Image (spheres, rainbow, N blue to C red):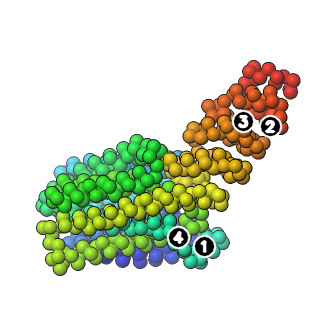
Amino acid sequence: MYILIAIVMAGVITVYKKLTSSQDQVTLITISGLLFSVSLLFFQSNLSGWMIPVFYVWMEIITVLSILQFWLLAGEVFNPRQAKRIFSLVIAGGSFAGMGTGYGIKPFVAVYGSENLLYMTIFFIGLSVVMGQLVRPFRIGRQGEMDQSDMLVNKQKIKFDPYLKAIALMVACSAFISKIVDYQFKIMAATAFPTQDELVNFFGTYYMSTGAATLIMQIFVTGFILTRFGILAGLLVLPLTLAVGSAGFFMAGTLLAVFIAKFSDQVFKFSINNAVQEILWLPFSPQKRRQSKPIIDGTIRSGLEGLAGLMIFALVSLKLIPESKIYLLSLIVILGVALWLWNCFRLKDGYVNSLMASIENRQLNLDHVEFDINDAHIVNTLEQTLNDKSEFKQLFALDLLWTLPLEPWKHTIRTLFSTGSLAVKRGVLELAWRQPDILPDQLIIENIHSNDELTPFTISCAGDRCIYKQVGILPQYL
């Protein structure tokens, strides 16, 4: 099934992009929602025999296209600065949905039976169509149309530098290993819970617990790890926990052991690993990001998932690894994790070097980042740039800080205001104009008394901060 899904999804995404590139997103959501609902009603009445694998693939298509449509519509509703504040809440909403679904499946199955779960799916698809119509008036612009620069980028051949290759290898390892762990988990679950209702209840509990854990990671843990320990720690969390879970399953061969691996994959992949992956794309220009990201996150990921499925099929069908000994697949997982861990250190070095190069070339644009900046490497890199001898680099770093909380750099900002060039001092003053906790009133007062070229601007700042009484010299300027 993994092979079939990879092949089908590659074709579906290609055809979908060609047919819908200039279409209205709300209209697409409405049409596809109706198509999905009617098709699921058909499957509800004919779910037997060869229709079961067809249904499995069709549900994958529904899931992928629905997520794609949602994020495209979200891009039309929110600008980048709004997205930075709101998208984290949207992602957290997905965790709440997983918890709610997991909690609600048991009572629903107890009353209506697992064979009627598709009706709930149809209901929520219909609800998404209604919500899409309600969102229609709030769109700020059409995002589907390409400008000339985008068309030029698409015509250019992608050059995979070592850092981009490292990102591709990370995504490939994650996709390949994830599918093996997913197969082991589902086989063990089906063996432990032979009846349909028992299996549904188990997966309900599983998704409820992973949803809660993912939410905790997103709110409390991800930012702490990235801020305190940097991007390398964030890169290592998922492969290390997968290695522990897979090693345990290899030695014990129990559902609990493989549950640890699958739980880690589900929770850390959609929390800290997703955040780290987005941070890794920061050093690239927007054009190169638009050009490369779909290939790595789409084509390469799907291809490796299909390759994992092909490998599993060959090993099991040829009885090289019987289903009773699927724990042996954990050896492949552990080898893959070893490659993944080695690549993490390459990624960390490549990220830091690329980040510095992006700042030097003035390519880094944090205004288009759709998440909170909690990476210690970004903080340190901007700190180094602010302390650079080049006035142009200092001014560029100050410009980047406009969209970020200034607390990590407040001491450097104060030093620049006291010792920097006139242009740098002016930049610092404008940046921290109404933030006395970053640029204290006393520094403003001292500059007013110094009576230099910056004084007219610091007087204006003092007026906006309402600190007239503290500035004895101010009345003579009025």
Describe residue 447's horizontal placement relative to residue 260 as left or right: right
Of residues 285 and 81, the one nearer the viewer is: 285
Quadrant for residue 290, please give it. bottom right
Point out residue 240 in the picture as x, y percentages from the top left corner.
Answer: 32, 55
Quadrant for residue 417, please give it. top right
| Distance Cα–Cα, label 3 vs label 1 | 44 Å
Residue at position x 47%, y 57% in the image: 348
Looking at the image, is mark 2 or mark 4 earlier in the sequence?
A: 4
Residue type, numbered disc 4: Asp
Describe residue 312's horizontal placement relative to residue 453 as left or right: left
Q: What element carries label 3?
A: helix
Residue at position x 46%, y 61% in the image: 347
Mark 2 — residue? 454
Mark 1 — residue? 153
| Distance Cα–Cα, label 3 vs label 2 | 11 Å
Point out residue 326 in the picture as x, y percentages from the top left corner.
Answer: 18, 67
Contact (Cβ within 8 Å) of mark 3 with mark 4: no
Of residues 65 and 445, the one nearer the viewer is: 445
| Distance Cα–Cα, label 3 vs label 4 | 41 Å
Q: Residues within 10 Å of mark 3 (few under 14, many from 20)?
A: some
Mark 3 — residue? 418
Point out residue 107 in the picture as x, y percentages from the top left corner.
Answer: 21, 48
Question: Visible in this render: residue 218?
Answer: yes
Looking at the image, is mark 3 or mark 1 earlier in the sequence?
A: 1
Which mark, by number, is residue 161?
A: 4
Residue type, numbered disc 2: Leu
Residue at position x 21%, y 76% in the image: 315
